[in-house]
Image (spheres, rainbow, N blue to C red):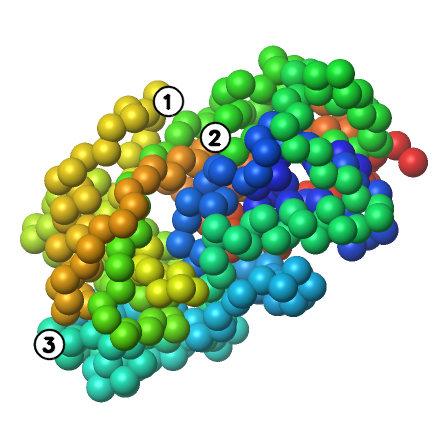
Amino acid sequence: MAVVGAGIVGLAHAHEARRRGLSVILLDRDEHPVGASVRNFGHLFFTSAASGEPLECALRARERWLELGQQAGIWMEDAGTVIVARAQDELAVLESVAGDAERGGRMLSAAEVTEMVPIPAGGVVGGFHGTHDLRVDPRSAVAALAALLESDPHATVVWQSHVHDVEPGVIHAHDLMVEAEAIIICPGPDYRHLPPSLRPGLEPLTLCQLQMLRVSPPAGRRYRNALATGYSLVRYPAFRDQPAAQALRQRLERERPELLEAGIHLLITQLPEGDLIIGDTHVYGETLPPFGHERLYRILLDEARALLGADLEVRERWHGIYPATNGADNQNFLVAAPLAGVRVVQNVAGIGMTLSFGQAPIVMDELLAVAPA
């Protein structure tokens, strides 16, 4: 099998191929991972998946993360996610999700929230603990997964190899020609630069751009749990699809329309050395501006400072970009079959870190069922 793209989607398929005993070659145009897979929170938000097949995919991905994380020596925190409720309509949404035992969620009192995470008690009316969720350092985890493949005698990783053409069974990359019975292309936001032969089926795609921050932590504070608020409940399917979420959205439309307009949902995770990642915003378009909006960074910082009850020093600002379908439905992946034995796989929901290891077996089952023997 040949895989193009060493982000988390490509790595998931490469590792799945090795799990099935296939030899693998993985190609990437850069010298190390620099795309969406290293620009995120490292938050494996399994709790947030929609019911049915998406949740099954998430739980399958969780088991694979635990397995490969141990093999690759990836730092991993299994304390879960705490969603802080600061209004009764937020509590109503959380209560409707907490009843699903398979999802691993449980309700928290206001006192339990502040015992678990070091935040001020003022305004907190309760919360939710997603016990299945994990956290990794995205800046090192993706590289560690690639290194694990590089250490495998039946896998080859070729960096700085730009693929310029693909045909059934063959990849052309500079002076390299790779023959493979099955080919998976995972271009991420670079899908527009694919050869014309690979573009059929990708027409629904657009781009989503995020604004994110890295800040110094309040002195001495550790946040084992990923930390979210009620703003996330109108974005993630498990919560957004609940009937109670309609009243929450209506209130936010009245009170905080600027948050909905910019797609802001406050999420905070802590890197192993202590710094906090804070985000994010969501803007969609075919061509995105290179400029960040300071007003949106200020909103994120103000919201984080209010939640944490502390001043925060900004250390980094950046954009994350991923392929999307404008958030119109619950679709998590777009899989196109432009050529025989070739699949183009795109995570279109911004949760590739969460779901890719669960989706890869589905793609592989279908592809290998029709690939030549």
Question: Camera-side residue: 94 or 307?
Answer: 307
Reading the image, the residue beneath label 2 is 189
Rounded to the nearest angstrom, the CA distance separating label 1 from label 3 is: 42 Å
Residue 140: x %, y % from top left: 52, 53
What's the mark number on residue 286?
A: 1
Residue 17: x %, y % from top left: 77, 47
Label 2's element? helix
Q: Which numbered disc flags the more N-terminal residue, 1 or 3?
A: 3
In the image, residue 317 sits, relative to residue 76, either above or below, namely above
Q: Residues within 10 Å of mark 3 (few under 14, many from 20)?
A: few
Whether residue 82 sits left or right of residue 72 in the image: it is: left
Q: Amino acid at mark 3?
A: Gly
Q: Nearer the viewer, mark 1 or mark 3?
A: 3
Instruction: Answer yes or no: is residue 232 visible.
Output: no
Q: Amino acid at mark 2?
A: Pro
Q: Which numbered disc flags the more N-terminal residue, 1 or 2?
A: 2
Q: Which numbered disc flags the more N-terminal residue, 2 or 3?
A: 3
Reading the image, the residue beneath label 3 is 122
Q: Amino acid at mark 1?
A: Glu
Q: Residue at x 48, y 53 (%)?
A: 138
